[in-house]
Image (spheres, rainbow, N blue to C red):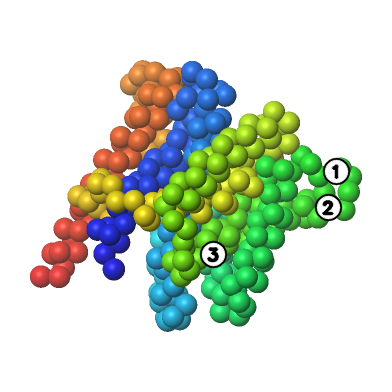
Amino acid sequence: MNEKHIYSGINNWKLLSALLVIAIHTSPLASYSPEGDFILTRILARTAVPFFFMVTGYFILPRALEEGRAALRYLRRIGIIYLASVILYLPVGIYAGHFKEANPVSLLKMLFLDGTFYHLWYLPALLLGFALVFFFLRSMPLPAAGILTGVLYLAGLFGDSYYGFLPDPSLAHTCYEGIFRVFEYTRNGLFYAPVFLLLGWTLASCRRPPLSLSLAGLGLSYACILAEGITLRLLEVQRHDSMYLSLVPLMYFLFSVLLDIEPPDLTERLPKDLPLLIYLLHPLVIIVVRAGAKITGLLFFINNSLLHFLAVTLFTLVCSWVLLVLKEKFLERNQR
């Protein structure tokens, strides 16, 4: 299946989602409007990571469920990428003091659950979520799997954007405090990832709605998530801001629309793994841009949030592209 050729809407959104992740970590509108930046990075950009989960659910899970070895190959590939990322960011983490008070238990927790750097949580979440959804679909009917992943997501909401609604003291509050001793956030492979992986598989395996209905649902869902995110912000109840109730229908309709439309493929001439490498490398580039700006005295690349975002984005694109081109040339030489 030539994913790049057939699914141009999906391919374009992959690249956009990678750039939205950079926006989340650089806050491009903060210098101009903190409220606008919150809407962009803490509401609208929160579609980026669920989208990547849905890509896996759509393209990988169906084949994995038919052939168990495909699941193992995929998990091994993600595991290798995660291990390489851990090694890459280990010196940065040591320099930043992330491991100063670490003990064997906290190190295992970071490695297998939370990630060893702030963006690497996605990879262990993907591994755990994929394994869970694979097990659910192999052992129970789709409605039961849907209910189970939905319940897990609802539970995760109260450790994330709805945390402030938990009465303190209460048994529920105590339970969530116990959860946070295991996970740093409920945005993880147990509560967060499974529902989006299952949504991706559902769109691949079941009949999806017509484009007109998906567009209507998408518009309504965007309105709902904006209202939800702004209201929760005003109420000051968010422990984190990754999980929204409206995000689930929004992602379903968004992915459905992207499957049905056929825009020009802006990624056609780009390396296939460019969005992945952008995701993995951009925190390093943030460090380099900030250090370079201080050394050269070009502090506007730090002080102006939009210029900071643009510099990090451009540098990350260039570095990722160069590395992938070098990789392709290296592989071509070895195959001769």
Amino acid of disc 1: Pro
**In terms of secondary structure, where does tag 2 sit?**
helix
Circle 3 residues within 10 Å: few <14, some 14–19, many ≥20:
many
Q: Which of marks 1 and 2 is nearer the N terminus?
A: 1
> Is 138 situated above or below 99?
below
Amino acid of disc 3: Leu
**Circle 3 residue:** 198
Q: Which residue is drawn at 42% across and 81% down?
A: 67
The quarter of the picture where residue 300 lies is top left
User: In front here: 196 or 298?
Assistant: 196
> Is 208 situated above or below 217?
below
- Pointers 1 and 2 in contact (CB under 8 A)? yes
Q: Earlier in the sequence, mark 2 or mark 3?
A: 2
Q: Which of marks 3 and 1 is in front?
A: 3
* x, y percent for residue 12: 33, 47
Amino acid of disc 2: Ala
Q: In this view, does 124 lie to the left or right of 140?
A: left
Q: Residue at x 67, y 42 (%)?
A: 161
Q: Earlier in the sequence, mark 3 or mark 1?
A: 1
**Circle 2 residue:** 172
Furthest toward the left, the residue is 336
For the residues labelled 2 and 3, the Cα–Cα distance comes to: 27 Å
- Pointers 2 and 3 in contact (CB under 8 A)? no
For the residues labelled 3 and 1, the Cα–Cα distance comes to: 31 Å
* x, y percent for residue 157: 68, 49
Quadrant position of the C terminus in the picture: bottom left
Q: Residue at x 52, y 61 (%)?
A: 199
